[in-house]
Image: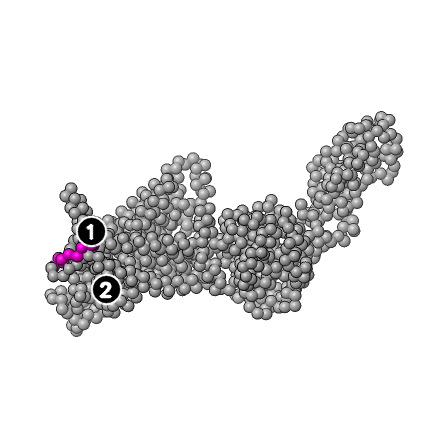
Amino acid sequence: MIAAPIAALGLFGDAFNFVFTPQEAEGGGVMVGGLDQVGELAAKQLEVTVLALGVALVLALPVGLLLGHYGKGEFVAVSAGNAGRAIPELALIALMAAAVGVGLFNLVVALAILGIPPILTNTFVGIKQVDRSSVEAAKGMGMTNREIMTKVELPLAVPTIMGGVRTASINIIATATIAPLAGILTLGDFIISRNVYGDAGVLAGAILVALMAITIECLLAGVQWALTSRGIKLQRAA
Amino acid sequence: MNELLLPIAEVSGDFFKDRSGGGCIQDNKLFCPGWVADNYDRYVDPTLQHLVLVLSSVAAGFLIAFALAILAHRHRWLSSPFLAGTGILYTIPSISFFFLLLPITGRGQLTAIIALTAFTLQIIFRNITTGLRNVPPNVTEAARGVGLTSQQMLWRVELPLALPEIVAGLRIATVSTVALATLAVFANGGGLGAEIIVGSNITFKTGIIVAGGIAVIMAILFDGLILLAGKLLTPWERAAL
Amino acid sequence: MPDISRVAENSSPNGATASPVRYIGVSKRYPGAESDAVHDLNLEVPAGEICVLVGPSGCGKTTAMRMVNRTVEITEGDILIGDRSVKDGDGAKLRREIGYVIQQIGLFPHRTISQNIATVPNLLDWGKPRIEERVKTLLELIGLDPEMGDRYPSQLSGGQQQRVGVARALAVDPPVMLMDEPFGAIDPINRSRLQNEFLRLQAELRKTILFVTHDVDEAIKMGDKIAVMRKGGEVAQFATPTELLMEPADDFVEDFVGADRALKRLALMRVKDVDLWEAPLTRAGEPTGPVKTALAASDIEVPHPLLVDGENRPIGWLSDRDLLAERVPAIPDSIADLKIDADQTLRDGLAALLQSGSLYAPVVDGRGRLTGVLSAEIVSDFLASPEAAEIAIPAVDRPHE
């Protein structure tokens, strides 16, 4: 029992080495590890994540905004969130690889599919829950529908919408990690292909993925803070 | 190229017995009912494993989150750190988690359960806290006035009133966990994921659809069951209608 | 004290910016409804006046008001602002020219007070310097410090928020204002204050205002003209507050106005507006003879002598014992504790009189000098007189203490 934790320390050391020094693969032959490879795979993971998140935002945000403003399609918008949660990521990636084919485009589509439900649902709920009196006052003062949506409803719904964006990004990053199964090499490759990278590689991969996920979370939290009007922050504190 | 993507035909073994005639499996069509009818019993074990994974993770997650929420309810300053802590666990992809636990618990079902449990913590914690916070203040005032202690108030008044919120959190957590547990195969934890990555191959379409389908159905069933249980536990909400 | 004169400088001369509003055969029927929400409404609101729409809930008063700025679309008929139909052109554009105040106020929580007030000017592309100037003026007008402009709604009290709501509606100096139970969400004490402040504002700005309320007392206080509506969106009576109190058109209006409508009328007038009684006056040190003679007169109104000082300020009532002496004593037997302010409402004056338990009380002006004596009988006689029927006092001139 005591041996395990001590061995663990050793493994962390190995993992640390792995990130910085290229070493020979488990199976022999190629050189793996080192900052170059790490950087390459990390960049790929980032690229895929950003693209998928962007696509999901572009598709889901306007739809959620319109539906929420006009109060239509509640069933669809809310069920989308529930349904999205039930999709097993592994099955999605596998099916994509098997039935549709591999490639960056397909991967981004698959990831976007995972990202759309939380953004759609949260945008819808966020917009719908904006204080009705503010919206009524805005309408009565002569704002057009578009002005109401962009100047009143969106700013007030930022916290809820960003919550959805952050959930979406967590889903996307997690799935991007298993993208190597479909031929796109991301940081997850270190984790999945143990026979190539060894235990050190696996651990290194796990740590790197976790770090990336946390960093992006913090970034989005910062974006949320920046986008939230001071008036709303005061209101919540009140 | 990743060996998992090799076409079925190249994978050796009489693993894919196709007695229904025709080349359904050989052609790797999307869904081969014949094969499924013959081979459905291969899914029983993975499904049971999956059930074990989901139930233990959600149960453990609920117990831990509950304890944290009660603590944070009594000592308000704890909410922020707890929220942040469970938040980190939520953010880290499960697969990453499996292997971060590698040095400590090795590979196996326990690792998978720990990681899945960690994922459910924030959702359940947040919902319990919100549910407790949303209890109308006049109700707690009245309870205190009648002479209930804090302890009694918590168990007899606040928690029951927070039930809808808690149930909602459980539903979300369970559905998410069912989907996520498919990844347990990477930690050698079994589950339906083992049938999605069949042997060392992920291009077996029928297999993916069946395994994925079972997971989705399981998620829907759990969702419905928890919803029902919630309704049964809150007769006053129904009476209001 | 808000500086109202500056507002007058910024906008056109009083009354010029106000337009009359006319309802011509207006009806509203919601799709699938059994009956009209508003039925064949014909109403003319003169420019610069407050018209109150009042009635029980569901009578269509809010619907009727909202058809003016097309937040509810007209089914039949037309509404004219000045000589323009509201149906001409785009709804959003129309609303930018009409002030709109609602009960829940609806300030934008994500914008500062200044930004809230500047909403419509921004929509109309007024330009920064002009907007800043206008916001500053309006803040002064509603009695808020200029620094408050940078605060957020959640940092203001309910009363302050409501005032900002009014300022926001006045931002582009619209000719017509719509107010839907604007003071409904405020506590009664502050509500009274806000009503008074608003009436003072209106005295300067003279906008055409459509005001909806369910409270008939508020209607009487605020309205120049009142339209009492019954369920089904019909007008039961359209009249001045006095007419409404004196001659309710039917049982419905009478019930709605309330059994105490006679008393309500007392709030419309000031003590100085009625003919007060006279009591025999005397000063300390004067011989008691003339007073005793006056007391014996048959046409005397107040059968008790009143002691006043050199400035004609009342000190108290002289009793029979006081009059036994040769000369009037300096201190009377009964000191006048209650002195009624001539500017007070007749209602408040009567209340004070009844509460003190006396039959009579001296009435004094702003400097404490006697103007007459009030008694309960004066009030009841007045209510019964034909004179009372002819009094029509505009809301902005009525006392609103």
| Callouts 2 and 1 in the same chain | yes
Image position, residue B213 (x, y; %):
26, 62
Q: Is residue C340 left or right of residue A230?
A: right
Please give the residue where the numbered disc 1 appears in the rendered image.
A16
Residue numbers of the magenta segment: A19-27
Nearest to the observer: residue B227 or residue B193: B193
**Marks 2 and 1, how far apart at CA:** 24 Å
Please give the residue where the numbered disc 2 appears in the rendered image.
A184
Image position, residue C20 (x, y; %):
66, 63
Task: Name the secondary structure under disc 1.
Answer: helix
Rendering quarter of residue C233: bottom right
Chain letter for mark 1: A
Q: Residue at x 38, y 61 (%)?
A: A120
Nearest to the observer: residue C126 or residue B215: C126
Q: Does the residue at mark 2 contact the one at mark 1 (Cβ under 8 Å)?
A: no
Rendering quarter of residue A98: bottom left
* Front label number (2 vs 1): 1
Image position, residue B207 (x, y; %):
20, 64
Q: Is residue C311 left or right of residue A171?
A: right
Please give the count of numbered marks on the rendered protein.
2
Name the N-terminal-most of marks 2 and 1. Answer: 1
At label 2, which amino acid type do we have? Ile
Nearest to the observer: residue A225 or residue C396: A225
Badge 2 density bin: few <14, some 14–19, many ≥20, Cα 10 Å: many
Image quadrant where one finds the N terminus of chain A: top left
At label 1, which amino acid type do we have? Phe
Q: Residue at x 70, y 40 (%)?
A: C351
Colour approach in the figure: one colour
Q: Residue at x 56, y 54 (%)?
A: C165
Q: Residue at x 85, y 26 (%)?
A: C325
